[in-house]
Amino acid sequence: MSVREQLLLADPAAVVERITTFLIDQVRGQNRDGAILGLSGGVDSALDACLAVKALGPSRVSLLFLPERDSSPQSRADAVRVATILGVPLQSVSITPLLRAVGAYRLEPPARFIPRTFQERYVEKRYRALQEGQPSTFLRTLRGGDGVEELRRSNAYLHIKHRLRMVMWYYWGELRNQMIIGNCNLTEKMIGYFIRYGDSGSDVDLIAGLYKTQVWQLASFVGVPEEIVQKAPSPDIAPGMTDEFALQMHYEVLDQILWGLAHAVDPVVIEDETGATAQQLAYVQELVRLSAPMRTLPPSPDLTDLVS
């Protein structure tokens, strides 16, 4: 069986059953009254919302839409559509005032009165300039910005958006005694395409065992609107920035490489089946290596011989 075939969900109904049973058990075991998640308008959060409602019912699920200055208008429309289908009220709270208060918007040129198409071109041009011959600018951010001040500013500007959203999830979750559901998938976890203590900050992760291409499969199976399943995945934190542009690789190829690496498939076989080059394979391996600390608890010194 090829790597591509290995990524096909043989029994999506069983996957849904496993996830929903897990959530029911976690809510009960952690003495929560329900669950809450950020609904961004993307496929990951839409799938999580569907799974949460299936497990707990609409009355025990809360959905938060947390836009800011750079959010796409389409994101709101898609979030509203999913919430309406599920019969769950969508609470929208802009985090723009918070970002403005901490000075985040001063790190980037003002966007007021500038058409979004021009903003998107600016973001793309800047990303390519910062790439500087590397496989991706994202790789450089995992290396701490390579000593480039503009990359450090970009990290601070983009990452605080995710972290403020996480704060809002927990604020509303604790008010309602609801468990926070994270929206990160396995592909993002493996390559570090998430923000520590940001979009990865949660009480449970329902889809962290699914590669992105499997998220698309399960989303279609549970009834997420096909327009949302098919639209280009985006973190929606910079105008026009999509996942695959940031990663400089299509998810279908990326997932096959990741699956092959995780299952110790011969690199030559991975390259042959995916059409990827040796350089692309090395790039993905480097993403996995650099992001390893993000997947563990914060390190601490061993003091057992001194304090015990």
Image (spheres, rainbow, N blue to C red):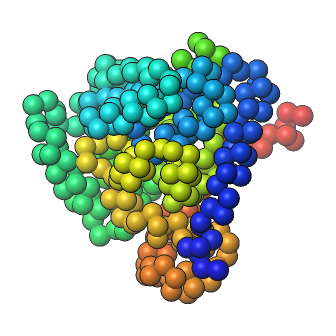
* Residue 69, picture quadrant: top left
Residue at position x 36%, y 64% from top? 248
Query: Which quarter of the figure is the C terminus placed in?
Result: top right
Residue at position x 10%, y 36% from top? 114
User: As drawn, which residue projects farthest toward the top?
Assistant: 175
- Point out residue 140 in the picture as x, y percentages from the top left corner: 39, 58
How many numbered dots are placed on residues in this image?
0
Query: Which quarter of the figure is the N terminus placed in?
Result: bottom right
Q: Nearer the viewer, residue 179 or 1?
A: 1
Residue at position x 80%, y 40% from top? 303
The reply to whether residue 208 is in sight is yes
- Point out residue 153 in the picture as x, y percentages from the top left corner: 31, 42
Q: Nearer the viewer, residue 13 or 90?
A: 13
Q: Nearer the viewer, residue 263 or 11?
A: 11
Residue at position x 11%, y 39% from top? 115
- Using residue 211 as the reference point, say whether residue 85 is left or right of it: left
Where 19 falls versus 113 (above or below)? Answer: below
The reply to whether residue 192 is in sight is no
- Point out residue 5 in the picture as x, y percentages from the top left corner: 59, 73
User: As drawn, which residue projects farthest toward the right?
Assistant: 308
- Using residue 297 as the reference point, say whether residue 40 is left or right of it: left
Where 157 falls versus 250 (above or below)? Answer: above
